[in-house]
Amino acid sequence: VQLVESGGGLVQAGGSLRLSCAASGRTSNSYFMGWFRQAPGKVREVVAAIGRSCGSTHYADSVKGRFTISRNNAKNTVSLQMNSLKPEDTAVYYCAATRDYCSNYGWYDPFLYDDWGQGTQVTVSS
């Protein structure tokens, strides 16, 4: 599946941004979707993930209560609403997909995901 992110940009601390990921290609299959981010000099880390058949959502501790992941299966899109942004949220954000599954394990592991978008830059100024 091909993934294209959009919605990144520059925002002041405390502000909000909404990222979107549009999927195309083998979209007839069910996919488990995740958002990851990578800051300069740091490893790629999970932000949030969402299943399809189970409707499960998962969040990294650093974003709980501030970020919300959602999906629109009819439009093959996944969104990440980011509120109360902090300078430490600055990173390139990536959308990722893998075959759908129901579990509380593995969603945080980037090696679980087969397809990745090109990334969108999010910069939060202090």
Image (cartoon, grey):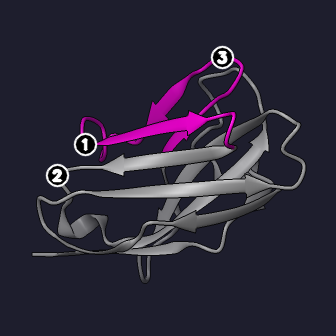
Q: Residue 53: horizontal and vertical position, in percent? A: 71, 19
Q: In this view, which residue lies farthest toward the top?
A: 54
Taking the magenta stretch, the answer to whether it contains residue 82 is: no
Res 66 label: 1
Between 36 and 53, the one lying in front of the other is 53
Which callout, 1 or 3, points at the residue further toward the start of the chain?
3
The quarter of the picture where residue 18 lies is bottom left
In percent of width and height, residue 118 lies at: 65, 74
- Disc 3 from disc 2: Cα separation: 28 Å
116 to the left or right of 14 = right
Q: Amino acid type of disc 1? A: Arg
Callout 1: few (<14), some (14-19), or many (20+) C-alpha neighbours within 10 Å? few
Q: Earlier in the sequence, mark 3 or mark 2?
A: 3
Residue sitting at x 51%, y 69%: 43
The residue carrying pointer 2 sits among few (fewer than 14), some (14 to 19) or many (20 or more) residues within 10 Å by Cα, namely some
- Above or below 126: residue 84: above
Q: Earlier in the sequence, mark 1 or mark 2?
A: 1
| Residue identified by numbered label 3 | 54
Above or below residue 1? Residue 65 is above
Please report the residue visible at 76 percent of the width from the left and 26 percent of the height from the top: 101
Q: Give the range drawn in magenta.
A: 48-75
Quadrant of the rendering where the C terminus is positioned: bottom left
Residue position marked by numbered label 2 in the rendering: 84
Quarter of the image that includes the N terminus: bottom right
SS of the residue under disc 1: loop
Q: Which amino acid does label 3 sit on?
A: Cys
- Are the two marked residues, 1 and 3, in contact with CB atoms closer than 8 angstroms? no
**Mark pair 1, 2: CA separation:** 6 Å
Question: Pointers 3 and 2 in contact (CB under 8 A)?
Answer: no
As drawn, 15 above or below 47: below
State left or right for residue 107 relative to residue 32.
left
